Image (cartoon, helix red, strand yellow):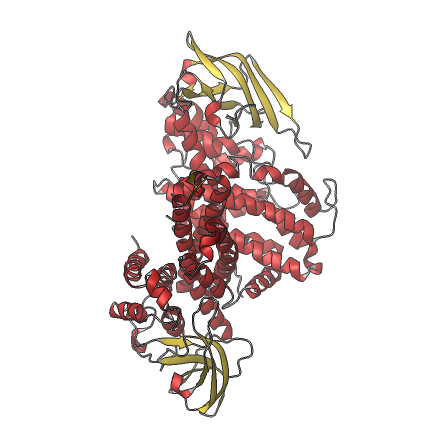
Amino acid sequence: MAIRLIPTELTDQERALQAQVRAFCDEHLPRGSFEPGLGMSSGPSKELSRELGRRGWLGMALPKQYGGSDRSTVDRLVVVEELLRRGAPLEQHWTADRQSGVVINRSGTEEQKRRFLPQIAAGELCFCIGMSEPDSGSDLASVQSRAVPVEGGWKLNGTKIWTSNAHFADWMICLCRTHDSDNPHQGLSQLLIDMKSPGITINPIVLLDGTADFAEVVFEDVFVPEALLLGQPGNGWEQVTSELSFERAGPERWITPVIIVENFLREHAQDLSPAAVDFLGHSVARWWGLRQVSLSVARMIDEGKAPALQAAMGKDMGTEFEQDVIATLQQLVDIEPSLHSSSLFSRLLARAVLVAPSWVIRGGTNEVLKGIIAKGLR
Amino acid sequence: MSEQDLLFETADRLFAQVSTFDEVQAAQASGWSQASWDAADALGLTRIGIGEEAGGVGGSTADVVALLIAAGYHAVALPLAESTMIAGWLANAPGVVLPQGPVTVIPNRAGDTLRLEGDLLSGTAHRVPWGRNADLILGLVDDHIVGFTPSQASIHHDVNVAGEPRDDLSLNGITPVLCVAALPEQDPQGLALVGALSRSALMAGALLRIVDITAQYTQERKQFGKPVGSFQAVQLHVVRCAEHAAQVDLAVQVAARECDRGEASFEIAVAKTLANDAARIASRAAHQAHGAMGMTQEYLLHQYTRRLWAWRSEYGDAAWVSTLGEAVVALGADHHFHIIADGSASGIEL
């Protein structure tokens, strides 16, 4: 059966929050005061993360008793879309705010919640994700990293790859095998890894744009105390799939090139071809529609529904459109984009050309998402 | 469950019974399904969205959109969009009273020459939906709402690519049965917007239907010993349909909600733009997933894809994209994201 989305809109309270965030951004992140990044890959800023934490804009949906704000997924959407569209540096808190805190709140022990959540909500902790491995990409159930029980905890060996921010992250939530089972979906567990633990080696991976935000993380006999097992031993597959499924349709899945098009309009307002005007109209239409999808999915999450298919559709549509935008922009303007140009539009476009292929890969490749959606339509 | 959900369910259940594959197929010859009209009329569905003083049962734009999504889902061979949403909009002008039977509205195509000279109406109107079947034909002419009957016009029968009647009318100095001053907002742009919203809603329904048809077919049809829907290349087509249908369905419902509040020209233009994109992309994907079977009149896919192709070209296709682009450029870079996030509330107006 066809999948339908329920229309929703911001409440007065949510609009008030939006106004606060806009005022904050105008004050702290005025245009020209920093070099904007592209979406989630915008670099870290501890100061900004702390400022956001101070205002209660991180870990928003976490319970107040653990330092959160008892707010909602929609509230978080309102905050992050304003920051993302300005290219604000969010990488210090991004992963912790979007998913690590949520997972710890859902699966963690009382002690873990007390230990981690207040610091996540304060913007003090940077988390990274240990899922993919050299031989384990979309097929996460095939992870080879293994933790064996030792006195007082676990001993972890293995290699994680494509880990964003590993070089400055404080903690990793690592998916590894703790039990043997004929069913590859069983016997996996999530461990909280202190990135300063002895036995961890971080090897940077340089990407097409010259940045080294990605890393390979090697674990050699890394000791993980018993108290840092997250959730039920052997239940890692369920925890990981729920972690991935709902977080997929956030604004970061369509908003990345908005700042590029905005600056295209700013710098080329006087020499727009009819095709460029049409593109500006068409792209705004698509973006408005995709934002309504994000908002609908966020509201469903807040209402306790399980919009896994809707979220997968949002990410698939949104990220493909992001790539379309970059391709069309290149056809519309006769410039050679350069990372060193004096034009912000040119710099952002050059970066986007180099990183756009990743947009439909990270967070679950679009091929895998399409498979999930197709199954859901049967 | 919202009022619109209830209305959709009621209409969906009714049309599933009367607007069957055979009925829609049979209606191709005349373009008209009497059984569907009688059933919808008996429940009052043909008068939703028309004020009570004009002979209707009232209801919001969101209500009418729910009805039209259901009508699109069942390819109902009737001028329901005209009789409810568009006629209802024209009937906001004081003095308009609509008959209980079918009403249609002149869509104001390029080349139309209708004009009022004193009390007399003359000229030609093109591509009037079900002009031959209507009890009353409404038009927006020289700041007036005019109404006349098919017997007052010389009618050239034509159809769109879906086989729906789209008739050309010539009038030679007739006295309209209705002629009242239009409200300020009842101008050609307003009519284009209401028409676009009506087509977007019908298209949302047809898109949802081709998702269901295609998902079912690709599970039943077996090749190489398994359902063709188990091949990833075929799944891609089904998913593309589903995504576009979900996007248009959501956009048109939000546009209707905003319309009930006031300014919604941006949301309507966006909904029609997304629906037009979807008509191209999802129809193509649905046909590819069906292979040759989708090309035959004996299989139901064409009842929906042909309507999508027809409705795409009605009440604006590429024109909305240019209009949106010009409005975005006029507001400038500083407003760009606010338009995306806030729609009409950002101040964008077409």
Residue A263 spot, x, y in % from top left? 65, 50
Quadrant location, the C terminus of chain A: top left
**Left or right placement of residue B180 versus residue A320 in this view:** left
Asked if one can make out residue A17 in the rendered structure from this viewpoint, the answer is no
Q: Nearer the viewer, residue A372 or B19?
A: B19
Report the number of discs: 0
The quadrant in which residue A359 appears is top right
Residue B58 spot, x, y in % from top left? 31, 69
**Left or right placement of residue A7 versus residue A35 in this view:** left
Q: Answer above or below: position of B299 versus B53.
A: above
Q: Nearer the viewer, residue A54 or B83?
A: B83
Residue B310 spot, x, y in % from top left? 48, 65
Asked if one can make out residue A151 in the rendered structure from this viewpoint, the answer is yes
Q: Answer above or below: position of A311 versus B115.
A: above
Q: Nearer the viewer, residue A276 or A9?
A: A276
Q: Residue furthest left?
A: B42
Q: Residue furthest top?
A: A151
The quadrant in which residue B39 appears is bottom left
The quadrant in which residue A135 appears is top right
Q: Please name the residue shown 49% across and 70% down the image.
A: B192
Q: Residue furthest front?
A: B224
Residue A100 spot, x, y in % from top left? 46, 29
